[in-house]
Image: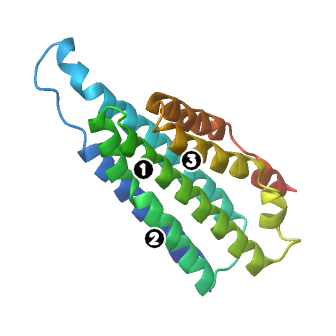
Amino acid sequence: MGKGRVEAFSDGVIAIIITIMVLELKVPEGFDLAALRPVIPVFCAYVLSFIYVGIYWNNHHHMFHAVQKVNGSVLWANLHLLFWLSLLPAVTHWIGESHLASWPTATYGAVLFMSAIAYFILTRVLIREHGTESTIAKAVGNDFKGKVSVVIYLAGIALAFVQPWLSAGLYTLAAAWWLVPDRRIEHLMEA
């Protein structure tokens, strides 16, 4: 079956996720700069989560550009990824409102961890569908960034119970690393 509906549905879900996150931002109660202080943690959590959603959308777009078809396994693997991403608005609000309390910080990391696992599963299902010599298989390669990211998220979850700000630093570091564009799929598609 064609991949168009998967891409359109995924784009719609991701747009809704971003919309829900921005609706959680509250207007400051005052009219001076001091009124911004209480909303800074929530805004910072929103920015980080927006970046993560953007990274997943960008990589999802590139990945589906490199595939030709989908099957039922791909549909379910894609829904699995969208499920974990759909939890980002809730954990974003929780971590922001809690000012990096341990459990919200660990839960935020757990959602990032499970999103990464779901993305890995989706790539493996797509590779199985298209073959080990396919563009998607060559582009994914050994997925070093993905594997290291999972370790970073696990470390962040553990550190949330020691120093939650270190967890937030690790989550931010992983996002910054993913912001560097990965041109493997583009280069393979051009060749």
What residue is shown at x 52% (from left), y 51% (from top)? Answer: 112
Along the viewing direction, whichever of 4 and 145 lies nearer the viewer = 145
Q: Three-letter amino acid code at disc 3?
A: Ile
Quarter containing the N terminus = bottom right
Q: Nearer the viewer, mark 3 or mark 1?
A: 1
Residue that badge 2 annotates:
9
Residue that badge 3 annotates:
55
Q: Earlier in the sequence, mark 2 or mark 1?
A: 2
Task: From the top left corner, tell me how far across and down residue 42 is, in percent.
Answer: 30, 34
Residue 99 visible to an observer of this rendering? yes
Task: From the top left corner, tell me how far across and down residue 86 is, in percent.
Answer: 40, 60
User: Relative to 36, does residue 183 appear above or below in the rendering?
Assistant: below
Q: Earlier in the sequence, mark 2 or mark 3?
A: 2
Along the viewing direction, whichever of 78 and 147 lies nearer the viewer = 147
* The quarter of the displayed image where residue 126 is located: bottom right
Residue that badge 1 annotates:
107
**Disc 3: CA contacts within 10 A as few (<14), some (14-19) or many (>=20):** some
Give the secondary structure at mark 2. helix
Give the secondary structure at mark 1. helix
Give the secondary structure at mark 3. helix
Q: Three-letter amino acid code at disc 1?
A: Thr
